[in-house]
Image (cartoon, rainbow, N blue to C red):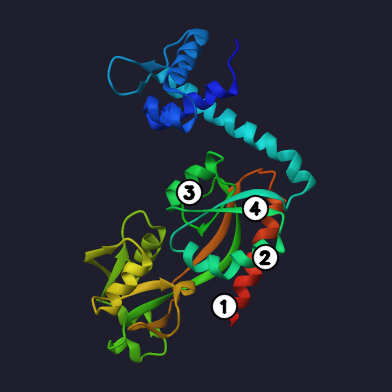
Amino acid sequence: MSMNLRDLEYLVALEEEKHFRKAAERCFVSQPTLSGQIQKLENELGVILIERTSRKVLFTPAGEAMAAQARRVLREVRELKVIAQNFAEPMSGEIHIGLIPTVGPYLLPHIIQDLRQHFPRLDFFLYEEQTHQLLKRLDDGELDCLILAETEGMEGFGAIPLYQESMWLAVPQNSSLATHGKVPFDALEGQRLLMLSDGHCLRDQALGFCFAAGVGEDERFKGTSLETLRNMVAAGNGMTLIPQLAVPGREEGGVSYRPVINPVPSRTISLLYRHYSVRRPCFNELAARIAMLIKTKMAG
């Protein structure tokens, strides 16, 4: 059998794109080339991988099983390529890091310049997506590690805690709550808070704290970002919880920010990686540096 890695890449691309032309473009080959190689693979294996009876690309059960295994093989090959380099020089080469939208814009300004200076042989590539997308890309081997808030469903990965981040209450500056130095959670009972839309892990965490304290969600609006929520609060349209690193100051842009106490709503921000990754020494050093930088920032 003359199956090669390129054939597996074609198969995985087609399974993910569900479209011959898009898969071919992704693999930088012509559509006839990709189609011909898939046909050749079917002939070699003696099974039909794709139904060709409709305009859609439909994978047979055999095709789906093959694509899943091909994805695993390609991931292992990528791991093989970095093993030698990472044993020789753990803090060198490309590193692809995924971050969630409620962490990335607020954490990166405090760390990325320092990391580039401190680890000059590392080439940082940064990606911002929601948690479920990042976990899939980490599992598929497309990303080396993630920086995100720990939630359920991450047990299959290794985690290095970076810092604990409390959530502050953001209210309009003319709100009676703005007169508090710190806001006890029970002072919010019966209130409704603006929340991010589905898919953001911060939404789930905030809802967990709010439900426990008898605080509801303002169903009239769901934000796509923290900045949208911040603007709604500034316009007098409600209140919300904002992670500490995203708090610019106690008074800023028509918004008053106050710590919440009894209990303090908080989340753990961690660096996630695949178990048994050969880059563990690199992640350890990165995590230690980030933890130190943020501890200094939060103390200031």
Nearer to us of marks 3 and 4 is: 4
Give, as a three-letter code, the residue at label 2: Arg
Q: Earlier in the sequence, mark 1 or mark 3?
A: 3
Q: Residue at x 23, y 65 (%)?
A: 221
Q: CA distance from mark 1 to mark 3?
A: 26 Å
Give, as a three-letter code, the residue at label 3: Leu
Q: Earlier in the sequence, mark 1 or mark 4?
A: 4
Q: Are marks 1 and 4 in contact (CB under 8 Å)?
A: no
Q: Residue at x 59, y 28 (%)?
A: 73
Provide the residue designation for mark 3.
134
Report the side of 16 relative to 274 (left or right).
Answer: left
SS class, disc 2 = helix
Q: Earlier in the sequence, mark 3 or mark 4?
A: 4
Q: Earlier in the sequence, mark 2 or mark 1?
A: 2
Image coords of residue 85 (percent x, y): 75, 42
Provide the residue designation for mark 2.
289
Q: CA distance from mark 2 to mark 1?
A: 14 Å
Q: Are marks 1 and 3 in contact (CB under 8 Å)?
A: no
Residue 124 sits above or below residue 9 on the image: below
Give, as a three-letter code, the residue at label 4: Asp
Report the side of 12 relative to 232 (left or right).
Answer: right
SS class, disc 4 = strand
Provide the residue designation for mark 4.
123
Residue 74 sits above or below residue 149 on the image: above
Nearer to us of marks 2 and 4 is: 4
Q: Nearer the viewer, residue 66 or 150?
A: 66
Instruction: Tell me if residue 261 can be seen.
Output: no
Instruction: Tell me if residue 48 can be seen.
Output: yes
